[in-house]
Every structure is written in structure tokens, then in C-alpha cells.
Image (cartoon, rainbow, N blue to C red):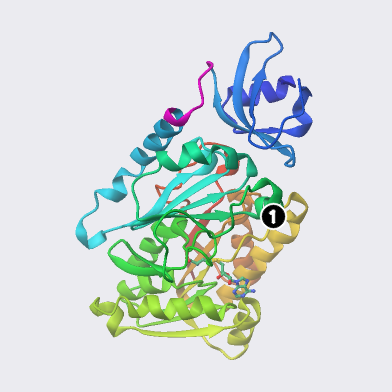
Amino acid sequence: MRVTPAASRALRHGHPWLFEGAITKQSFAGVAGDLAVIFDKKRCFLAIGLYDPDSPIRVRILHAGKPVLINRQWFQDKIATASAVRCPLRTQPVSRRTTGCRLIHGENDGLPGLILDRYENTLVLKLYTPAWVPHLHDILPALPAADRVILRLSRALTSKPERLYGLEEGMIVSGSALDGHVMFWENGLRFEAEPILGHKTGFYFDQRDNRARVEKLAGGKDVLNVFSYTGGFSVYAARGGARRVMSVDTSAAALAVATRNWNHNQQVPAVANSVHTTLAADAFETLARMAEQGRHFDMVILDPPAFAHKRKHLAKALSAYRRLAVLGINVLRKGGTLVQASCSSRVSADDFFDQINRGATEAGRSLVEIERTGHAVDHPISYPEGAYLKCLFAKVL
Ligand code: SAH
């Protein structure tokens, strides 16, 4: 196929997506998973990628530059390169042992629309486009050794069963069956996750480094972890010496796992000495009610789901982040620590941090930034949209 000059430039610069509107000529109508070869206006090879006729991202680029053969060996090399990036996680001391991490981060590791997470001996492969389905026979043998590989499918796939050729969401595509949950280590803490039923592939590995930062700041504090999911931040806060931790989430099922994760770490004296409570409730209503009741904390963690999935939701998302900042700050004692994150890739870091600062002004408090952070090492960023996670650590006076 041939593409617009702007798209040619973007592909040359390594952008992983070719949008449907940028295609100027296509030799034939392909099917999902076909390898699309893209030429520039001088008919020279530009890039090769996976074709998806049902997605506005019509081609997900596997390779740009000189022509290459895309085969099992090529996938194996890509997976090995991605694995090398994660070396720091494998060489940690026993006290910071980490056996759960992301091995392939889609576009950012050159395999667009494909995620691979490891939970000790279980791999979870998540696909975001049916274009990967015809290539699974090359991908599966190229994956690292494990007891089993679980397949997770995004809505783009589950809504098109005819493209799945018998594959199903949550099925084991190789290895033994899984009885219930998986157990793994993260920075020397023990966690369980539900890779078949859980969010993403079961755990938010992208927040690992931010959890470790919370641990460092939590000593002696009364901590409120809002949007806690399965309690990752809560357990780290406890190991960091938090006196009390309250986990708030609308999902009672996630909170039940949070309680179990807390219990899995009772061998850590600081966790055993800390007190954990959970509350299944809406974050916004809970924070507002706590402020009315004069309930205050020394640290408030706000890690909501993405507020902006589409560009048209951007303005609303920004104001929701500001409102959340105000609500969080209203339950913080003077000198308390605010930890607020956004995982909306459409919200820029500058806009997000700006909203929190405005929220502080609105709440009549001043905010001293400690650190602005992003992704953990197993979530590399190789294109602008890949930088989705932003997190602010600040002292609120
Ligand atoms: N901080 C977590 C990840 C949070 S994911 C971690 O480190 O693992 C977002 C969580 O927000 C989900 O568990 C979801 O159930 C919860 N959630 C979504 N909307 C909510 C709301 N209005 N009030 C409270 N929790 C909410």
C-alpha cells in the first residue's frame, strides 16, 4: 500500500500506527492479520505491519526501514530484546525479589497490540487486535518457558468471534490448567492476582515503582488508598511503616483480594503491626463525606481508572482530575502527602499536573511538589502515546 507524505514521515520516525485515512492506495482488500507492506512515493519499502480491516489503526507496524522477513525467528528476536530491558528486575536481591512483571509492552517493545505479563510461572498473553490471531503459531513457541500461557482478549476481539478461530477469552493456550489465582513476588512482597478475571492481566505492574515510593514516604502515617483495587499501594505503605491503611474501591471482589494480599505479608513485621480496613464505596462520595465529618489522613493515594478514553472526553477528564485533587486534599492533614496518578494517555503530563495544582489552590492549600513520576522499567515508552502513566507526589501545606 501507499500512504500520505505525513504518514511516511511518521513511519520513518518509528511511529507504530498507520491510520486508515492515511492510506492513499491499496492493492487488494486484506483480512485481519495479513502482513501489509507499505511503500513510499518512490515505491521504496517503508514498513511492514499487521493489517486490521476493522480498526481505524489499519496497520500496526512491526518494522520500518530496510525490508525484513517476518517469521518465528523475527518474533523470537523481538521477545529476546524485550526481555533484556527487564534485566534489572531479574537481578534484584532476595529482599526485593520480583517474579511478576510485564515482559512485552505492545507498541513500546515493537509488538503493537500485544501484551505479555509474567506471574511467576504463568504467562498471560493479551491481544488488542485480531490481527495477531493468525500469527499465534509463531508467537507461542517463541515465548519464554512457563507452566502455562493464558490468553486474554480485548473487546476488539471478543466482539468478533468469527475472527478468533476457536480461541476464547481466558483460555489456556499452552501448559496446565490454572486452579484459581496466581501468586508472585513484587519487591519482596507476596501478592495474588486473578489473571483470567482480573483487570488488565490481573495486576497493575506499571505502578510498581510508585508503590515503592509510597513505601518510602509512609512511615508512621495514617494512609487512605483510594481506587485501591487489590491493595498494591496499601501493602507497600504498611511495609513502609504506616500506622493504619484504609483501602477504598467500588469493587468488593477487589477489596477481598486486597485483604488477602495484606494477609499474605504478615511475615513482614511492619505489615503485621499495621491495621488495614477496607471500604466498598464510591471514591468521590466517600472523600466528600469524610471531609464533612472532619476525617483526616497523613497520606492520600488517588489512582483512578482512565477518565479519558476518547479525545472528546478530555475536558471532562481534566476537570474530574481537578475535582478529585480537591477532594483528596480536603481530607489531608497539614503537611500531608498527596499521591495522585493518571493512566489516561490522552491527558498530557503537563495538563494533569496543572489540574492538581489548580485543585490545591481551589482547596485553599499550597502544594510543594516532591516528585513527578511515570512508568516502571518494564513499561518502556517508545512513542508519544505510550507515555500514559503520570503520578505526582506532593506535600500539601
Ligand atoms: N491502584 C490500583 C489500581 C487501580 S485501578 C493498584 O495499584 O493496583 C482502578 C480501580 O478503581 C479499580 O479497582 C476500580 O474498581 C476502581 N473504581 C473505579 N471507579 C471507582 C469509583 N467511582 N470509586 C471507587 N473506586 C472506583
* Type of secondary structure dominating the magenta stretch: loop
Dividing the picture into quarters, in which one does residue 356 lie? Answer: bottom right
The one of 361 and 209 positioned closer to us in this rendering: 209
Q: Is residue 348 magenta?
A: no
The one of 373 and 251 positioned closer to us in this rendering: 251
Which segment did they paint magenta?
A: 66-73
The quadrant of the rendering that contains the N terminus is top right
Circle 1 crowding by C-alpha within 10 Å: few under 14, some 14–19, many from 20: few
Q: Position of residue 355 (x, y in %)?
A: 64, 59
Q: Amino acid at mark 1?
A: His
Q: Is residue 70 left or right of residue 21?
A: left
> Residue drawn at (48%, 28%), measured in percent from left and top?
71
Q: Position of residue 112 (x, y in %)?
A: 56, 39
Instruction: Residue lying at the far top in this picture: please name it.
Output: 42
Vertical position of residue 133 compared to residue 261: above or below:
above
Q: Is residue 193 left or right of residue 18?
A: left
Q: Is residue 68 magenta?
A: yes
Dividing the picture into quarters, in which one does residue 78 lie? Answer: top left
Answer yes or no: is residue 223 visible: no
> Residue drawn at (59%, 84%), measured in percent from left and top?
291
